[in-house]
Structures are given as structure tokens and as C-alpha cells.
Amino acid sequence: MSTIHFKPLESSDIPALMDIYNYFVMNSTASFHTEPVELSEFTESVVHTNPRFQTYVITLDDDDELQGYVQVMPHKKKQAYSTTGEVTIYLQPSCVGRGVGSAAIQFIEAFAKEHGFHSLISTICAENKPSIHMFSKNGYSQCAHFREVGFKWGKFLDIVTYQKIIS
């Protein structure tokens, strides 16, 4: 397997990452957006002014193309939530099942520990079995299940929340 690299997000990376995200908007229930996001909205979701919240671009040795991104962002805006981060990962479909997602989780956990986080969560569509499996095998446990909270492609969708205490 090739070596996986993580680098801080640069503004020039944003259009390629938006294309990866929009692929999932249009082809899956991994995102609850129902239409492709525009550059300004996507930029707002991946660029964080607080250095505790960051987005990292994923690349592989054997390919200069961006393979996806991982980020830790605020779970909620209220101050008491400051030790909890929300993890999001989106990968090129060709990377799924190759260990890239697990490496991204391990990378962002190390970053989160260095920045004082106690707990990490990920909110996942309940029918997204690959993501559920990836977080489960990396020590995350289901802590919530919300029924029929999203509506996409003519059906109601559940979300599940997975959590890991990292400190």
C-alpha cells in the first residue's frame, strides 16, 4: 500500500475537495445536502479561524491527486462543548476500503489530543455501512440513533452518532 500523507488545507485545494464532497451529495446519502454545494458554502465548512479546528488534505505517494479530506470541527458553538470535536471524512470513492479512512481517523485523533479535546464524535447516515464500520473498528461506539431526521431521494433517513473518548 502507498504511504498516506496529510497536509493542512490550502485555498487552492478547496475546489477539488468540493468536487469530492459533491460526488457524495449527488450519489449517496453520506451527505444530507440534496443539491451540489457552491464554493462559498463549501469553503465556509472547511476553513476554520480557530487553530483547534482544522481540515487536512489527504494524498497518497503514488498519486499527486487529492484523495480526500479529514477535519475536526466544533460539535456545538456553546463554550461547554469546547472539549468535543466532530470528525468528518470524505474520500475519493477509489480510496474506500484501502485503509485511508482509518489512517485519517488516527491522524485527526492525534491532532485532537494535542489540542485538548476529550471526546470526538461523528454523525453518520444509518445506511452508510462503510463509514459505520470504519469508525467502529477504530474504537468509536454508537451513542445515539435519531430516526427519520433527514429526507432525501423520496425517503426518510436515520442518523447515528459514534463517539470515542480520546483523553
Image (cartoon, rainbow, N blue to C red):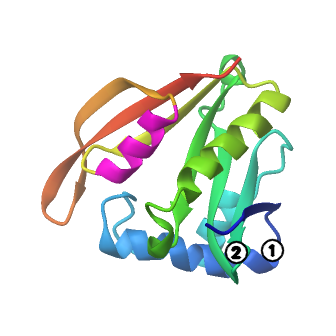
Q: In the image shown, does 4 or 84 lie closer to the viewer?
A: 4
Q: State the SS at label 2.
A: helix
Q: Is residue 143 above or below residue 122?
A: above
Where in the figure is residue 45, as x and y percent of width and height? 63, 58
Residue at 58% across, 74% down? 18
Residue 99 as seen in the image, left or right of residue 6: left
Does the magenta stretch mainly form a helix, a strand or a loop? helix
Callout 1 environment at 10 Å: few (<14), some (14 to 19), or many (20+)?
few
Residue 145 as seen in the image, left or right of residue 140: left
Residue at 83% across, 50% down? 49
Residue at 74% across, 58% down? 56
- Asked where in the image residue 119 lies, by quadrant, the reply is top right
Residue 14: image tag:
2
Where in the figure is residue 149, as x and y percent of width and height? 26, 41
Callout 2 environment at 10 Å: few (<14), some (14 to 19), or many (20+)?
some
Where in the figure is residue 92, as x and y percent of width and height? 51, 73
- Asked where in the image residue 93 lies, by quadrant, the reply is bottom left
In this rendering, does residue 132 appear at all?
A: yes
The answer to if 135 sits in the magenta stretch is yes
Residue at 29% across, 29% down? 145
Q: State the SS at label 1.
A: helix
Give the residues in magenta: 128-138
Count of numbered tags? 2
Q: Which residue is mark 1?
A: 11
